[in-house]
Image (spheres, helix red, strand yellow):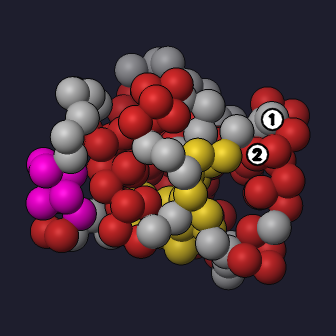
């Protein structure tokens, strides 16, 4: 199982050509090995849509319903354990979504599919 950063989720589901070769190969294995996303990614996508910075060609509600139908994709709720890990990260990064994704990956012991250099510099288990 792997964890998808928000942009990796969007690219995997909507724009797969944007994924690197390694990221694409990891995403191809989702059907067999599964993947996890943080529910904060849904929030992050919604904020970008609301601000006019992102158009996914459908409503956020429709997109989330499609995600929920993918049997090998799990949407992890952000619980108190994840928030506590988020707060304890020794990482000077103010983005709550990135911090939550990293905290979730750490707690679940998963690699993260991400192009984000700040995550790559902090978290040692990145696929890109």
Membership of 35 in magenta stretch = no
Kindly check if marks 2 and 1 are in contact, taking CB atoms under 8 A apart as contact: yes
Is residue 53 depicted above or below 114 in this figure?
A: above
Q: Position of residue 118 (x, y in %)?
A: 43, 26
Q: Which residues are magenta?
A: 82-88
Figure disc tally? 2
Q: Magenta stretch: dominant SS?
A: helix
Q: Which residue is mark 1?
A: 20
Q: Position of residue 87 (x, y in %)?
A: 12, 48
Q: Position of residue 97 (x, y in %)?
A: 33, 41
Q: Is residue 16 visible?
A: no
Is residue 20 depicted above or below 39 in this figure?
A: above
The residue nearer to you, when weighing 123 against 11, is 123
Is residue 7 depicted above or below 81 in this figure?
A: above
Q: Most extreme residue toward the front, as rendered?
A: 124
In the drawing, does residue 105 fall left or right of residue 67?
left
Q: Which residue is mark 2?
A: 23
In the drawing, does residue 69 fall left or right of residue 51?
right
| Quarter of the image with the C terminus in it | top right
Q: Quadrant of residue 84?
A: bottom left
Give residue 114's mark: none
The residue nearer to you, when weighing 5 against 103, is 103
The residue nearer to you, when weighing 108 against 83, is 108
Q: Residue at x 52, y 64 (%)?
A: 110
Circle 1 residues within 10 Å: few <14, some 14–19, many ≥20: some
């Amino acid at each position: 199982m792997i964890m998808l950063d928000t942009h990796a989720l969007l690219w995997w589901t909507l724009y797969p050509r944007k994924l690197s070769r390694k990221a694409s190969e990891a995403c191809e294995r989702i059907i067999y090995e599964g993947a996890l996303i943080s529910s904060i990614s849904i929030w992050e996508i919604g904020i970008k849509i609301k601000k006019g910075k992102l158009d996914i060609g459908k409503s956020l509600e429709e997109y989330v319903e499609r995600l929920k139908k993918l049997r090998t994709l799990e949407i992890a709720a952000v619980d108190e354990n994840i928030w506590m890990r988020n707060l304890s990260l020794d990482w000077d990064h103010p983005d709550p979504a990135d911090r939550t994704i990293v905290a979730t990956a750490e707690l679940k012991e998963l690699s993260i599919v991400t192009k984000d250099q700040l995550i790559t510099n902090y978290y040692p288990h990145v696929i890109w």
